[in-house]
């Protein structure tokens, strides 16, 4: 089990669902992939200070 927390911006979540990927797909598809490291809370949090929600 992974002990990571993710923060997904609402505009990235889509209308119905979103899947984040931890490993490369078997067919090596890389188009439209949501990599887990792009949404790690500790990576996303610093950017919130420069773009406050109003």
Image (cartoon, rainbow, N blue to C red):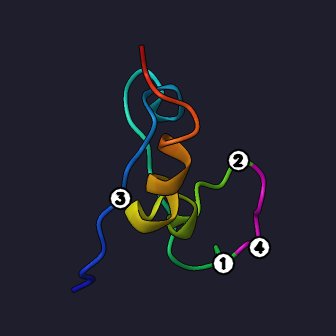
In the image, residue 39 above or below residue 1: above
In the image, residue 29 above or below residue 53: below
| Proximity of marks 4 and 1: CB atoms separated by less than 8 Å | yes
The answer to whether residue 33 is left or right of residue 39 is right
The crowding category of the residue bearing disc 4, from other C-alpha atoms within 10 Å (few below 14, some 14 to 19, many at least 20), is few
Identify the residue under disc 4.
28
Query: Which circle, 1 or 2, is nearer the viewer?
Result: 2
| Proximity of marks 1 and 2: CB atoms separated by less than 8 Å | no
The answer to whether residue 33 is left or right of residue 43 is right
Report the residue at 30% width, 74% height from top. Answer: 4
Q: Secondary structure at mark 1?
A: loop
Q: Residue furthest bottom?
A: 1
Disc 1 to disc 3, C-alpha distance: 24 Å
Disc 3 to disc 4, C-alpha distance: 24 Å
For the N terminus, which image quadrant? bottom left
Query: Which circle, 3 or 4, is nearer the viewer?
Result: 3
Q: Position of residue 45 (x, y in %)?
A: 44, 54
Q: Secondary structure at mark 4?
A: loop
Magenta segment, principal secondary structure?
Answer: loop
Disc 2 to disc 4, C-alpha distance: 12 Å
Identify the residue under disc 2.
32
Q: Which residues are magenta?
A: 27-31
Q: Position of residue 7 (x, y in %)?
A: 37, 50
| Proximity of marks 1 and 3: CB atoms separated by less than 8 Å | no
Identify the residue under disc 1.
26
């Amino acid at each position: 089990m992974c002990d990571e927390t993710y923060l997904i911006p609402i505009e990235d979540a889509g209308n119905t669902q979103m899947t984040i990927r931890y490993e490369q797909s078997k067919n090596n598809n890389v188009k439209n992939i949501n990599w887990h490291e792009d949404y790690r809370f500790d990576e996303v949090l610093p950017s919130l200070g420069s773009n406050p929600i109003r």
